[in-house]
Image: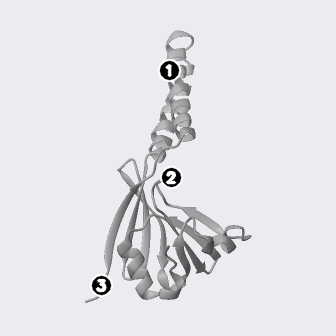
Amino acid sequence: MGDSYKEILVKRETSGADQAKKFLIIGVTVLLAVGGIIVHPVLLLGALAMGIVCYFVLPRFDLEYEYLYVNGELDIDKIMSKQKRKKCASYDMNLLEILAPSNSHELDSFRNKQGLKVRDFTSRRPDAPSYSLVFNLEQGQELVKVELDADIVGDIRRIAPRKVKQY
């Protein structure tokens, strides 16, 4: 009774810089392969090395974040190319300092703070509503940007009503 469970999947938009990096890596690989066939076979070793780089680096450009909220704990996993899953972070709402929309003035005192670690787990779409959470951790304060829905924000408000700012 009173248990809260919510799962949200957020796909990160690929930026222009990420697209350029992908095409650059693939282009260099293709050029080395063609050069190895036409110019000198030693270039095929470079193409092989770049192929290995492509295998390990290209999946990092296709990202999804999974938020799992269970009874006051937020777990964030990173899913690369819909195949590999990696745990990014876990946060306890008892350590929450403030939760507010990312563009809120309530966060102004935290934005320019020295030593504040900022972690962005959003889709990076300008139209997507995102929230910023500030946690007091052992390593110091950490600002976390996520895209939560009304159910999770409501449950966090139930746990810590004075720490949640909604506008």
Task: Kindly check if marks 3 and 1 are in contact, taking CB atoms under 8 A apart as contact.
Answer: no
Query: At which x and y percent is residue 148?
Result: 42, 68
Q: Residue furthest left?
A: 1
Residue 99 visible in the snapshot: yes
Q: Which one is nearer the viewer's eye here, 153 or 141?
A: 153
* Structural distance between the alpha carbons of marks 2 and 3: 33 Å
Numbered disc in front, either 2 or 3: 2
Q: Residue at x 44, y 83 (%)?
A: 157
Q: In the picture provided, is 133 more to the left or to the right than 4?
A: right
The circle drawn on residue 3 is 3
Q: Secondary structure at mark 1?
A: helix
| Quadrant of residue 8 within the rendered picture | bottom left
* Structural distance between the alpha carbons of marks 1 and 2: 39 Å
For marks 3 and 1, the one nearer the N-term is 3
Residue 69 visible in the snapshot: no
Q: Secondary structure at mark 2?
A: loop
Q: Which one is nearer the viewer's eye here, 60 or 65?
A: 65
Q: Secondary structure at mark 3?
A: loop
Q: Residue at x 39, y 79 (%)?
A: 154
The circle drawn on residue 126 is 2
Q: In the picture provided, is 149 more to the left or to the right than 89?
A: left
For marks 1 and 2, the one nearer the N-term is 1
Q: Amino acid at mark 3?
A: Asp
Task: Kindly check if marks 2 and 3 are in contact, taking CB atoms under 8 A apart as contact.
Answer: no
Task: Kindly check if marks 1 and 2 are in contact, taking CB atoms under 8 A apart as contact.
Answer: no
In the rendered view of the protein, which quadrant contains the N terminus?
Answer: bottom left
Q: In the picture provided, is 114 more to the left or to the right than 34?
A: right
The circle drawn on residue 81 is none
Numbered disc in front, either 1 or 2: 2
**Which residue is the site of mark 1?**
33
